[in-house]
């Protein structure tokens, strides 16, 4: 993994590049720890030799794992990094393109990069925190304001 600070901030912004064979979730999480990121947004493109996506099953309160055991293009990765119990946690959704032009999508649970993953990570306000939500069993971002906005 290589990273370069491209804007010292605020907000701080990095270009992060992963190489073949690196595990995407572990590398991006390690980067967040090393940079002491409390809250960030990220986008990425690239490709994977294999991946495991997830679909959150509310009845089970767990992710159904979706194995993608083939080379795929990373069409889009959108996500955030926020503190969960004081530790940076990656939460990302991806769309991957198969060789026949079809796509698969879901939560990114794990993926092996092949040949690259190119991400832009932008620091967000540090007051974004994840809190356990008893209703869903998920750690959800709370802005600190409980006021509900209406469209």
Image (cartoon, rainbow, N blue to C red):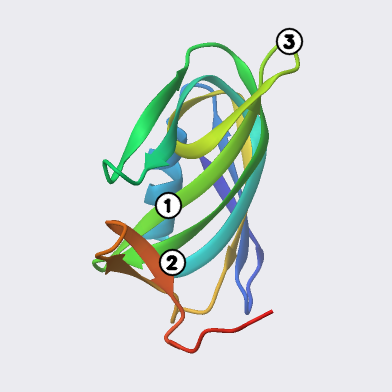
- Above or below: residue 109 compared with residue 90: above
The earlier-in-sequence mark between 1 and 2 is: 2
Mark 2 — residue? Answer: 37
- SS of the residue at dot 3? loop
Residue sitting at x 59%, y 14%: 71
* Residue 102 percent across, percent down from the top left: 70, 19
Whether residue 109 sits left or right of residue 3 in the image: it is: left
Would you identify the image quadrant in which residue 150 lies? bottom right
**Mark whose residue sits in front, 3 or 1:** 3
Whether residue 16 sits left or right of residue 112 in the image: it is: right
Image disc number at residue 20: none
The earlier-in-sequence mark between 2 and 3 is: 2
Q: Residue furthest right?
A: 101
* Residue 63 percent across, percent down from the top left: 34, 38
- Above or below: residue 23 compared with residue 115: below
Q: Real-space Cα distance between discs 2 and 3? A: 38 Å
Residue sitting at x 40%, y 42%: 56
- Above or below: residue 28 compared with residue 45: below
Q: Real-space Cα distance between discs 1 and 2? A: 11 Å
* Residue 11 percent across, percent down from the top left: 62, 75
Mark count: 3
The earlier-in-sequence mark between 3 and 1 is: 1
Mark 1 — residue? Answer: 90
- SS of the residue at dot 2? loop
**Mark whose residue sits in front, 2 or 3:** 3
- SS of the residue at dot 1? strand
Residue sitting at x 41%, y 65%: 82
Evaluate whether residue 22 shows in this view. no
* Residue 104 percent across, percent down from the top left: 60, 26
Image disc number at residue 100: 3
């Amino acid at each position: 993994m290589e990273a370069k600070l491209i804007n010292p901030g605020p907000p701080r912004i990095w270009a992060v590049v992963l190489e073949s064979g690196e595990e995407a979730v572990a590398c991006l999480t390690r980067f967040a720890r090393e940079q002491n990121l409390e809250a960030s947004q990220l986008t990425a493109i690239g490709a994977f030799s294999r991946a495991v996506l997830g679909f959150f099953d509310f009845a089970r309160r767990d992710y159904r794992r979706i194995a993608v055991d083939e080379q795929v293009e990373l069409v889009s990765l959108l996500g955030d990094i926020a503190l969960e119990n004081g530790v940076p946690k990656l939460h990302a959704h991806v769309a991957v393109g198969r060789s026949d032009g079809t796509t698969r999508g879901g939560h990114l649970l794990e993926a092996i990069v092949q040949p690259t993953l190119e991400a832009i990570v932008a620091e967000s306000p540090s007051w974004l925190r994840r809190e356990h939500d008893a209703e869903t069993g998920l750690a959800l971002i709370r802005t600190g304001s409980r006021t509900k906005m209406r469209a």
